Image (cartoon, rainbow, N blue to C red):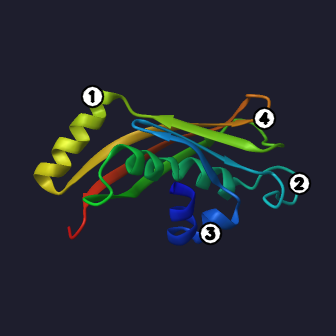
Amino acid sequence: MINGGMEATIPAAHKLGIKAVEARRGYAAATVPLAGNGNHFGVVYAGVEFTVAEILGGIIAIASFDAAKYYPLVKKLDIEFTAAARSDLRAEASLGEDELRRVEAEAAENGKADFMLDAVVRDEAGQTVALTRGLYQLRAHGK
């Protein structure tokens, strides 16, 4: 469901080959292939690493909150590239249950709620190649 939704709503991410591989309340993981996403010196293009990490905020929101009531958006994302990415990548992020309850309650009361999400992007060997910290918002439809 999430991958089909991504194809329809974020075609650029779909074209990069990004796939949600795990999605449950408070947790998301996505992958992206090296093939077709390299740059001029043979590593994964920085924008691809950014995108596979950034999309996790939306995946977590869809898996954790009522999509009929709320939608996610990103307000800010900082990335630190820690190593060259020379293989397929996996990005992961999680939010604790207390934070999920806070976000849900605040969004129900105010029509929106901000939340911070840290993500890690690793290569096939498990080496961290990028770290992100994003400010996301859960927003009620019609707000």
Instruction: Report the amino acid beneath label 1.
Output: Asp
Q: Amino acid at mark 2?
A: Phe
Instruction: Give the number of the mark in front: 2 or 1.
Output: 1
Q: Residue at x 41, y 46 (%)?
A: 63
Looking at numbered disc 3 in the image, what kind of residue is underneath it? Ala
Secondary structure beneath dot 4 equals loop
Sequence-first disc among 3 and 1:
3
Q: Nearer the viewer, residue 37 or 24?
A: 24
- Residue bearing the label numbered 1: 98
Q: Position of residue 120 (x, y in %)?
A: 59, 35
CA–CA distance between discs 2 and 4? 19 Å
Q: Secondary structure at mark 3?
A: helix
Residue at 78% x, 44% y: name it: 88
Q: What residue is disc 2 on?
A: 41
Q: Nearer the viewer, mark 2 or mark 4?
A: 4
From the image, tell me which residue sits under label 4.
124
Mark sitting on residue 12 = 3
